[in-house]
Amino acid sequence: MSHAVQLCRAHATITGGAFTSPTRGSTNTVPRPTPKTMPPQGDPLLPPPTQRSNGLTPLPVLVQNPTGRFRVISTKPLPGTRWIDALVEADCRVEICTAPKTILSPADITALIGDRCDGAIGQLTEDWSGELFAALRRAGGRAYSNMADGFNNVDLAAATRYGIPVGNTPGIASETTAELAVALTLATARRVVEADHFMRDGKYDGWLPTRFIGNPLKGRTLGILGAGRIGTAYARMMMEGHKMNVMYYDLYQAKKLESFTAVYSSFLESLGEAPLTCTRAGSVEEVLTQADVISLHVILDDSTRHLINMERLELMKKDAILINISRGPVIDESALVEHLKANPLFHAGLDVFEEEPKMQPGLESLANAIVVPHIASALMFTRAGMATLAACNVAGALQGFPVWPHHDDVMPFLDETASSLPQACPSIVNAKELGLAVMGTVNGSAK
Ligand SMILES: NC(=O)c1ccc[n+]([C@@H]2O[C@H](COP(=O)([O-])OP(=O)(O)OC[C@H]3O[C@@H](n4cnc5c(N)ncnc54)[C@H](O)[C@@H]3O)[C@@H](O)[C@H]2O)c1
């Protein structure tokens, strides 16, 4: 018998025997047993998965907890193991697609779903259209979660039509994502990547007073479009680290950011330093004309697609810095390329692109743009946390758990020292439309 088969059998014995699905008691928590997750193993003992009966090319999967009652697929291997533990605790058989393909097509995912699938975890690169939710529904699916904060890749109306709760993973990535915005801001302001290339190209022939002059940040105006969780975290970092004044535009007042500014300014004044300001602008244009650094933190929807277009680029200062870690289509990327070409003092730092994984031709040769491949949430803690939240969304929905009420505080799902998981789905974006119960409320009112 091969080692893989032995491991798989051992795991099946543990999960199928002593380790059964959690009971639904009156408490809010599920006892968390000692983690039983093992490195995922293939499952050669089981008959071929049922998805192969739909005629589509099968994709390789690794199986955890083969005897689990609910079949849950993940379109990708995910970081960490706690996400698998959460699903196994909920009596799920977890099938993890290992196809060596970065972006799965709808046909690939339909094949994975097969003709029996209770829940799915997907990625922001995948097109979760009505077609996929129909396939999931046909297969008996009752839960889906993106492993992402944004869900612009999901046809929410279709999922709702099929009665499928759609989870996302907000909150966990806010600081991490904001940090990359800070990194791009500093790198563009101080021309780090240009200077790095200059060195590697062997062009450095000695210090010069005029070489690679950058943009100052201290005391300048930071423009935030979308002052939600990430916009606020980034603004705070730039205020604390670089003493920038903030001007923001959002549909709502950023109360947390404004009160932070007041408290932090008092602290600065107590040190004899100048206070900082945080001003809510009346329009996007007001921010663009006044800010030295403009950072985009809106969600992507119809109101924000091409929020930054040619006309709005023209309003910005000629030496402004534009940062985008939100979603690519928030900027008209071809207009940005033209603007960068025409304005060499203007800089852009981009983590996301309009037609990922492609970037607009011309961008690759522009020294005044820094481009990175959508890595804003790429810390192990964050990505593993996102995976855990996605798994808890699916596991919770399959067990009929209510929705977690504290949208901005998902840490109880991630606290490794806690002995139990909250008995709730961390974040379901169509909960209201589906009439799902919220934990701690009765008919929508607080208990
Ligand atoms: N690059 C990455 O890896 C990465 C990681 C996490 C999140 N994101 C993106 O960042 C986005 C924001 O995340 P968040 O957690 O801060 O979300 P959030 O919901 O807390 O904040 C979004 C803010 O945008 C505002 N907004 C929405 N429409 C607007 C409009 N038309 N004009 C002005 N403001 C508007 C909202 O009022 C809200 O305050 C996500 O939706 C996601 O697309 C990217």
Image (tube, rainbow, N blue to C red):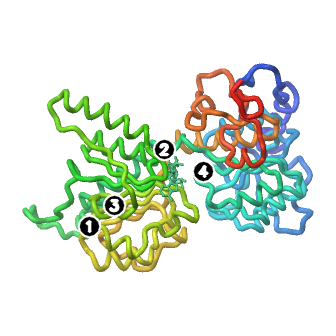
> On the image, numbered disc 3 is attached to which residue?
286
Dot 4 beta carbon under 8 Å from ligand 1: yes
Q: Residue furthest front?
A: 282
Identify the residue shown where x is 84% and y is 48%.
118
Identify the residue shown where x is 65% and y is 33%.
405
Task: Choose mark 4 or mark 1, whichever is in front.
Answer: 1
Amino acid carrying label 2: it is Arg
Q: CA separation, marks 4 and 3? A: 31 Å
Image location of residue 351, percent across then percent down: 45, 60
Please state, as top left, top right, bottom left or bottom right, where the N terminus lies in the image.
top right
Vertical relation: 80 (above or below) 74: above
Q: Secondary structure at mark 3?
A: helix
Foreground residue, 235 or 328?
235
Task: Choose mark 4 or mark 3, whichever is in front.
Answer: 3
Residue 229's disc number: 2
The first of marks 2 and 1 along the sequence is 2
Foreground residue, 48 or 76?
76
Residue 317's disc number: 1
Amino acid carrying label 4: it is Ala
> On the image, numbered disc 4 is attached to which residue?
148
Q: CA separation, marks 3 and 2? A: 22 Å
